[in-house]
Image (cartoon, grey):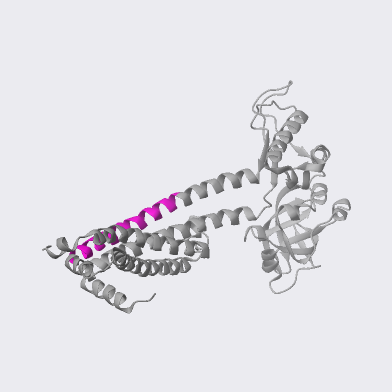
Amino acid sequence: MFDIDRWREIFQSIQKNKLRTFLGAFTVALGIFIFTVLFGMGNGLKNTFNEFFMDDAQNVIFISTGRTTKAYHGFKEGRRIQLKNEDFDLLKKEFGDKIEYISARIYKSVSAKYKKESGVYNVRAVHPDHQFLENTIMTEGRFLNNLDIKNKARYAVIGRLVEKDLFVNESALNKNINMNGLSWKVIGVFRDAGGDNEERQIYLPVSTVQLIYKNTDHLDQINLSYNLAIGVDGARKMVRDIKKTLKKKFHVAKDDRGAIYVRSVFENVEMNMQFVNVLQLIVLFIGIGTLFAGAIGIGNIMVFVVKERTKELGIRKALGASPRSIVWLILQESIFVTAIAGYAGLLLAVFVLSRMGNSLKDYFITNPQVNTSTIVTATIILIVVGAIAGYIPAKRAASIRPIVALSDD
């Protein structure tokens, strides 16, 4: 129940010990401030990793090639391994039911022009499934389809910023742009969570690019996503099997690490998220340490308060005050000071984090914020810290015998 006399005593005690109360409260406020800011920055680091990997589907496997590092089956080391259309078909045949989406990639750079506007852009020649591998979001028109690949159509799907650069205030849909002297019809415009670099890309049909550039069937890369039903262990096995299949096809030694590269997004995500989680754990320990430092500060203040009020507490006991009421009086003061100081530190930390925004993005910290569950947890921690800080001196105060208290100098 609310006892106005008790609260009046608490405020009188705080007023009599202004400096000590301020120093203890400052320690608690600083502790919760540091805890919240560090935790928010940990979330910001996690946001950066999530944003980085959000550009691609989380179950993507990237396949590329290099040069052999060992002689094998009569072939010399240093041999260049080149992916071709037949390798794309081989993977579809060998891993058909395990593949969700699959697309090849060919990388080019082109000079694009529309009327008086021009620019240099990166081109990716791809298959239709690439839209789902890259999480490409169409805002106008459509993405490439299988008929475009079959007909070797001269169609282009351009990023939002390419449209902005070349067409300014016009819509690019169904208009023709000149790329390296050839005319391409824009059939779609997309945006991408990967940011500006991704939105300055141009997608073309892989078959058309192969025809135009030296009439070749060469591919730079093959990307695929595995069926989520096979799980992470199945995905790891699939990565090993893809390496084995391609090494056998290209006559590459099993222990040759330079010829075939198979990289999976989930392995990168796991590794980086483990790193982020370890950082957050370190932050948590640092934060808890600063909170307990605040608890020690409040505890010391309450020890002095009890010592100064020894006679008063002795008189209370002599007049019939129960040990429980004395414990609660000291605890209530401790929790009150801790809660007020803690909330001040918490509010300041939330304000600082909100002001930071994305200003630390160059340091891999994106939108450093704390969520509601963190604030609730911090509230509980504040109450616990306040109770711990006040309990020991409160227990000591309750155990003082009246005769001892009255004779205290």
Task: Name the residue rendered at 73%, 47% in the picture.
Answer: 228
Q: Residue furthest bottom?
A: 4
Q: What secondary structure do most residues of the magenta stretch adopt?
A: helix
Q: Quadrant of the N terminus?
A: bottom left
* Res 162 seen here: yes
Residue 408 on the magenta span: no
* Res 81 seen here: no
The one nearer the camera, 344 or 20, is: 20
Quadrant housing residue 134? bottom right
Q: Quadrant of the C terminus?
A: bottom left
Residue 360 picture location, percent across and down: 48, 60
Residue 13 picture location, percent across and down: 24, 72
Q: Which residues are magenta?
A: 282-308
Residue 42 picture location, percent across and down: 48, 55
Q: In the visual, does 24 lie left or right of 353? A: left
Number of residue marks: 0
Q: In the visual, does 90 lie left or right of 34? A: right
